[in-house]
Image: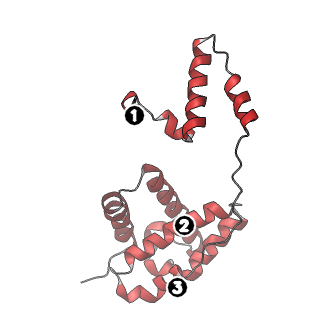
Amino acid sequence: MTPPTLSSLLQGFFTARLMRHLRASPQTFAAYRDTFKLLLTFAADQTKRSPAQLTLDDLDAVMIGAFLNYLDTERHNSTAPRNARLAAIHSFSRYALPLIPECAHTASQILAIPHRRHDQMTVSYLTRTETDALLAAPDRTTWYGRRDHALLLTAVTTGLRVSEITTLSISDVTTT
């Protein structure tokens, strides 16, 4: 039996692993897709071959290290996006490892590439005075003001993110 190609491994990773097994969110799927588009374009430029001609051997630890350096120097990515892209590459390596055991050494070298450490931002909270000022800002004599006040009050009292609030529907509300 012939070993799987890079394209078949990527297809299996996205369809079997991310979609079926992990049931990854559309955002995760898109982020991983973008990572591999960047990686394959970068590797193609480095090897002077088209992305379709790349093999799994082309994506070794040296190439991944050069790609991460490219993200830092050329694309000016901060630590968080760099680590997110590395997480996608690590996930692919863990997926491919049992399918191509002859590349175990390469996969283990890729998996050994550490995430970059960065300082966590301190989460700051609004003071009571700031919260009261925020809630008092909308003009509640208008329909838009009452709507804005309700959204702000929901955000302040529940701690939901804006993306979570905008996806709320009437069925999500319970009155008790």
State which mark lies toward you, 1 or 2: 1
First in residue order: circle 1 vs circle 3: 3
Quarter of the figure with the C terminus: top left
Residue at 52% x, 85% y: name it: 109
Query: Which element type, helix, strand or loop, lies under badge 2?
Result: helix
**Spatial distance from mark 2 to mark 3, Cα to Cα?**
17 Å
Q: Which of the pair 86/1 is nearer the observer? A: 86
Category of crowding for the residue at label 2, using alpha-carbon neighbours closer than 10 angstroms: few (below 14), some (14–19), many (at least 20)? many
Disc 1 target residue: 172
**Spatial distance from mark 1 to mark 2, Cα to Cα?**
40 Å
Disc 3 target residue: 109
Give the farthest residue toward the front: 176
Q: Which of the pair 52/18 is nearer the observer? A: 18
Q: Amino acid at mark 2?
A: Leu
Q: Position of residue 93 (x, y in %)?
A: 44, 75
Give the farthest residue toward the top: 141
Decide if residue 106 is on the left or right side of residue 10: right
Q: Is residue 107 above or below residue 88?
A: below
Q: Amino acid at mark 1?
A: Asp
Q: Which of the pair 46/17 is nearer the observer? A: 17
Q: Position of residue 16 (x, y in %)?
A: 31, 63
**Spatial distance from mark 1 to mark 3, Cα to Cα?**
46 Å
Q: Position of residue 78 (x, y in %)?
A: 69, 61
Residue at 61% x, 36% y: name it: 156
Disc 2 target residue: 39
Q: Is residue 50 visible?
A: no
Quarter of the figure with the N terminus: bottom left
State which mark lies toward you, 1 or 3: 1
Q: Amino acid at mark 3?
A: Gln
Give the farthest residue toward the left: 1
Residue 68, image quadrant: bottom right
Tag 2–tag 3 contact (CB < 8 Å): no
